[in-house]
């Protein structure tokens, strides 16, 4: 545990289309800077490797070969795909890393709900069971299919950034990628870190400030990317079975031992809607949720 | 498709999958750094017809002042029963016989190790002490560890020295020294997020008294008087032991393969191989089981023989622990993590050593098959 003569250093940076932050407690400013730079480099490495917006990322290369030749992938990618597979099974198919292709029908920049025919044209391209993984190679069974690590890629980057800082010898730090964060060690004096949770409807208000002494926090909400048509909100979390927006919850925040886990749990809970609360309760998860009618459920 | 084992297994399944990722989180302990642990173990060992050993052990480990760690343990061995003392061929073939009353002996041991971490390098010093009625040992050691490649590679080097005094409860005048120096080099390498291998070589150089003061060989000859010869071993022993361990976690099966191979050789002529394979299977987020099987084979020491010659060789022993034999030992361990801080474990095992299990088949006929059971119960508390 660092002693109380250490200083809190904050480093902000832009990655994954958002403002992000690394906080490090250290007695040595050079160590804090080295560790933060290593963490930031690791976040950018993962963004470069797995972003579907970058043409030469692993995900884009796999998507480019959809319906064609299998693409060889490394152990890190295989482990992430195995994790996506576990999420798919534990969510009874709701969590589906191929559902990103539905964004061709939903343009969250204009308030228009796609017609059923548009969704029907794309739904055949959605389906985790259509991703073939064997012998360290990945292939989409059909042309046009898209793999998207959006449901856990940022959270994985949070965990990797925390690990990289731990390797540098840092014992007290926090990595925050636009609200998904992980904590390394406790603050000096064993005080918990205080994490502010955004209010899903009021930009200027915090829903809650949670004391977190360990582990990781992730949040999913219908306010991150959405359109409102005829008073109904449609958000970027899309149900792979229907192609339509998840419904029932405004936001879920979960604490888990790893951000990757917390992120997948919040995504699955949002997709399950109201039933997601029962799912979280049975799992014994620590969570804070806001239902669609504004009711706050605090199980933190 | 509803989960049938209860939704807590959903958390466990996700946690297991997360375990395969190269990230910090461990599914059982939360991210807060643990400060230490203490544990108590009770070991029982019973040979059929021969010895029984009961050993309670108390141990602990704690980190303090950011870069220090101390480990300590204390144990008492309570040994009772009979030990083979005489190998006699009076019946025509050499057999082990037990003479004298059965023994009851207590052995106390204690050790402490202090480690200081300097970034990627850490240095440790240790002291150990052991005492029983006819034997006393004092040892110290130093060990250095270096982490490389973002802790994917760890190198270890160590040196130790032990000073022993050997006596005999039958002969109060016996008080002989035995000194051993030990050198160790090792490497641990993380191969993938789910696999690692480690390999360590230990060389020892010992000088002093190695005879077993309780063992005798009684040999009858076709003509002339029989000879009763005490156990006389060389006054030095140089050994090499090379242990390689492999661990591979298989996320889709929720299990881990554990394989250990050890090669041993010394200048007494003994060569031994041990291979143990175990599979640790997680049943849910609290229970795991580990079945395992160990195979052991050993070649005899140069000076081992169940009979003596006339005149007897200067160095000779009929102790069957120096003969050629092999052994199979199956075991089953059950582990229960009852909450974030408490872990219970129980192990049951069986040891079967026999001449016909020797690799190549040519074990010593005089080897009396050893059958032994052992059990272990342990509890660990983390804080």
Image (cartoon, coloured by chain):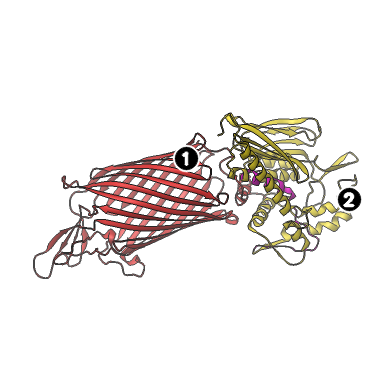
Chain colours: A yellow, B red
Residue stretch in magenta: A136-163
Left or right for B42, reference A197: left
Query: Residue sitting at 42 percent across and 49 percent down?
Result: B347
Q: Is residue A140 left or right of residue B185?
A: right
Count of labels shown?
2
Q: Give me the residue at 61% from left, 50% from top.
A: B22
Q: Residue tagged by mark 2?
A: A114
How far across and down, in percent of the image, does residue B240 sit?
Answer: 36, 58
Crowding around mark 2 (Cα neighbors within 10 Å: few <14, some 14 to 19, many 20+) is some
**Residue A15 has which mark?**
none
Looking at the image, which is closer to me, A46 or B310?
A: A46
Task: Say which chain tag 1 marks.
Answer: B
Q: In this view of the protein, can residue A183 be seen by the observer?
A: no
Rendered location of residue B339, percent (x, y): 53, 39
Find numbered disc 2 in the image and state the secondary structure of the residue it sits on: loop
Distance in Å between CA atoms under marks 2 and 1 = 63 Å
Q: Is residue A162 magenta?
A: yes
In terms of image quadrants, where is residue B71?
Answer: top left
Q: Nearer the viewer, residue A203 or B287?
A: A203
Residue B23 % position (x, y): 61, 47
* Labels 2 and 1 within one chain: no
Whether residue A254 is visible, yes or no, is yes
Q: Is residue B378 left or right of residue A30?
A: left
Magenta residue check for A147: yes
Quick check: A186 above or below A14?
above
**Which percent across, then down, holds residue B200?**
44, 55
Q: Nearer the viewer, mark 2 or mark 1?
A: 1
SS assignment at label 1: strand
Q: Nearer the viewer, residue A180 or B258?
A: A180
Q: Is residue A288 above or below residue B102?
A: above
Label 1 belongs to which residue? Answer: B116
């Amino acid at each position: 545990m660092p002693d109380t003569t250490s200083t809190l250093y904050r480093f902000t940076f832009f990655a994954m289309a958002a403002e992000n932050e690394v906080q490090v407690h250290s007695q040595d400013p050079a160590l804090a800077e080295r560790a933060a730079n290593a963490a930031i480099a690791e976040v950018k490495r993962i963004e470069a490797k797995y972003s579907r917006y970058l043409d030469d990322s692993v995900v884009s290369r796999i998507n480019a070969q959809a319906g064609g030749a299998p693409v060889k992938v490394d152990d890190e990618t295989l482990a992430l795909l195995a994790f996506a597979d576990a999420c798919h099974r534990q969510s009874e198919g709701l969590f589906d890393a191929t559902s990103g292709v539905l964004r061709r029908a939903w343009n969250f920049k204009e308030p228009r709900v796609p017609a059923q025919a548009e969704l029907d044209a794309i739904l055949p391209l959605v389906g985790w069971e259509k991703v073939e993984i064997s012998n360290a190679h990945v292939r989409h069974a059909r042309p046009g299919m898209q793999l998207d690590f959006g449901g856990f890629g940022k959270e994985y980057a949070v965990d990797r950034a925390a690990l990289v800082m731990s390797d540098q010898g840092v014992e007290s730090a926090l990595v925050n990628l636009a609200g998904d964060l992980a904590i390394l060690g406790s603050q000096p004096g064993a005080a918990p870190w205080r994490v502010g949770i955004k209010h899903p409807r009021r930009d200027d208000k915090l829903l809650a400030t949670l004391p977190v002494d360990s582990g990781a926090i992730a949040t999913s909400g219908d306010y991150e990317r959405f359109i409102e048509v005829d008073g109904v909100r449609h958000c970027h979390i899309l149900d792979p079975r229907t192609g339509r927006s998840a419904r029932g919850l405004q936001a879920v925040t979960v604490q888990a031992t790893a951000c990757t886990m917390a992120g997948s749990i919040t995504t699955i809970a949002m997709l399950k809607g109201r039933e997601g609360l029962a799912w979280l309760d049975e799992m014994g998860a620590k969570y804070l949720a806001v239902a669609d009618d504004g009711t706050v459920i605090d199980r933190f | 498709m509803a989960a049938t084992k209860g939704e807590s297994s959903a958390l466990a399944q996700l946690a297991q999958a997360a375990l395969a990722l190269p990230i910090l989180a461990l599914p059982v302990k939360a991210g807060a750094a643990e400060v230490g642990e203490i544990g108590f173990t009770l070991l029982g060992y019973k040979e059929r017809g021969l010895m029984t050993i009961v050993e309670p052990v108390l141990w602990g480990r704690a980190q303090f002042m950011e870069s220090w760690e101390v480990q300590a343990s204390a144990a008492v061995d309570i040994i009772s029963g009979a030990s083979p003392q005489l190998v006699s061929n009076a019946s025509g073939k050499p057999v082990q016989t037990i003479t004298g009353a059965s023994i009851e002996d207590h052995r106390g041991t204690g050790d402490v190790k202090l480690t200081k971490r300097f970034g990627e390098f850490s240095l440790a010093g240790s002291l150990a002490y052991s005492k029983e009625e006819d034997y006393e040992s004092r040892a110290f050691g130093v060990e250095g560890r270096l982490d490389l490649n973002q802790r994917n590679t760890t190198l270890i080097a160590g040196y130790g020295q032990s000073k022993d005094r050997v006596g005999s409860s039958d002969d109060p005048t016996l008080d002989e020294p035995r000194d051993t120096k030990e050198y160790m080099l090792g490497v641990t390498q993380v191969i993938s997020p789910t696999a690692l291998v480690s390999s360590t070589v230990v060389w020892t150089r010992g000088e002093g008294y190695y005879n077993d003061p309780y063992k005798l060989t009684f040999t009858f000859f076709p003509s002339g008087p029989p000879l009763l010869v005490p156990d006389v071993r060389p006054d030095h022993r140089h050994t090499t032991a090379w242990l390689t361990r492999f661990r591979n976690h298989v996320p889709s099966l929720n299990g881990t393969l554990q394989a250990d191979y050890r090669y041993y050789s010394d200048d007494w002529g003994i060569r031994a191989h041990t291979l143990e394979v175990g599979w640790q299977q997680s049943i849910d987020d609290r229970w795991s089981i580990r079945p395992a099987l160990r195979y052991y084979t050993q070649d005899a020491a140069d000076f081992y023989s169940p009979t003596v010659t006339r005149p007897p060789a200067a160095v000779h022993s009929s102790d069957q622990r120096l003969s050629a034999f092999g052994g199979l030992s199956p075991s089953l361990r059950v582990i229960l993590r009852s909450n974030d801080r408490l872990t219970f474990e129980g192990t049951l095992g069986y040891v079967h050593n026999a001449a016909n299990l020797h690799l190549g088949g040519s074990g010593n006929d005089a080897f009396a098959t050893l059958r032994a059971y052992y059990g272990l119960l342990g509890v660990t508390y983390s804080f």
